[in-house]
Amino acid sequence: MKTAIYPGTFDPMTNGHLDMVQRAVNCCDRLVVGVARSTPKNVWFSLEERVALVKTATASLPTVEVVPFEGLLVEFARELGALFLIRGVRAFSDFEYELQMALINRKLAPDVETLFLMPAEEFSYISSSRVREIAALGGNVGPYVTPEIEEALKRKIEERRETRDTPRRSAAGG
Ligand code: COA
């Protein structure tokens, strides 16, 4: 049984990530979407929220599992017995960073191979941070995420607005 991992931060998962998952399931028997806990990125969604959103988005794919991880990706791969890491290359600009990561991972774990897949062209310019930015500025993110994730983004924006405004209100009140 060939297990592959598709790792990422997924803050939140986009249709580009989903397109990658749909392509990757055809390359392995079991695809684990690995949701990274620790990330240098300033994430909007908690680990639990990111995992739940990926689970909902991939629910119709029976060979997909969604598992959070922390620490080295190659250690996570060893724990799962995964032989493949799947990464998406959207544009030439992704390549240098991806090559570096793949070579480091190969040095750390020579038995784990990185496979690069290309998402559909219509998703080649999407990233999670662009989707968050559009949503935060009131734009339509419908073409880029599932309806559940669009709703989650709306709720998150409301939540962030409330936490941002609450201290000001109490400061004004006190
Ligand atoms: N569709 C849409 N967006 C995509 C995409 C696709 N097909 N493929 C990549 N992206 C986006 C991501 O959403 C992300 O966007 P953002 O920066 O706006 O969030 C961006 O491309 C690049 O992502 P990247 O910086 O590669 O991070 P990641 O979130 O995909 O995941 C990990 C990086 C978690 C895989 C990596 O940090 C890791 O392996 N961490 C574990 C620690 C470790 O082992 N380190 C040593 C590795 S060298």
Image (cartoon, rainbow, N blue to C red):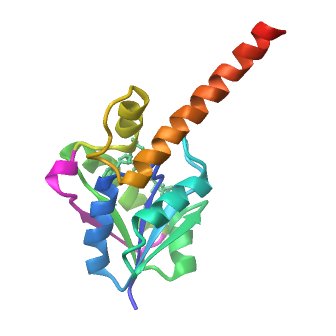
Relative depth, front residue between 115 and 133: 133
Q: Residue at x 42, y 37 (%)?
A: 132
Which residue reaches farthest bottom?
Answer: 1
Taking the image as shown, residue 78 lies to the left or right of residue 172, namely: left
Picture quarter with the N terminus? bottom left
x%, y% of residue 86? 34, 67
Q: Is residue 107 something that shows in the picture?
A: yes
Taking the view exactly as shown, the residue that stands out farthest to the right is 174
Residue in view at x 42 percent, y 74 percent? 110
Q: Inspect the magenta stretch and tell me whether residue 115 lies in it.
A: yes
| Residue 112 inside the magenta-drawn segment | yes
Residue 129 horizontal/vertical position (percent): 40, 38
Which residues, given as a range, are shown in magenta?
109-124
Query: Is 52 drawn above or below residue 165 in the view shown?
Result: below
Image location of residue 17, percent across then percent down: 33, 57
Horizontally, residue 115 falls left or right of residue 10, namely left
To which quarter of the image does residue 5 belong? Answer: bottom left
Which quadrant does the C terminus fall into? Answer: top right
Judged left or right of residue 160, residue 130 is left
Which residue shows up at 43% across the image and 30% down it? Answer: 136
- Between 46 and 8, the residue placed more toward the observer is 46
- Number of numbered labels in the structure image: 0
Q: 103 or 98, which lies in front?
A: 98
Say if residue 13 shows up in the picture: no
Residue 130, how many percent across, how many down?
A: 35, 36
Residue at image location 33% in from the left, 31% down from the top: 139
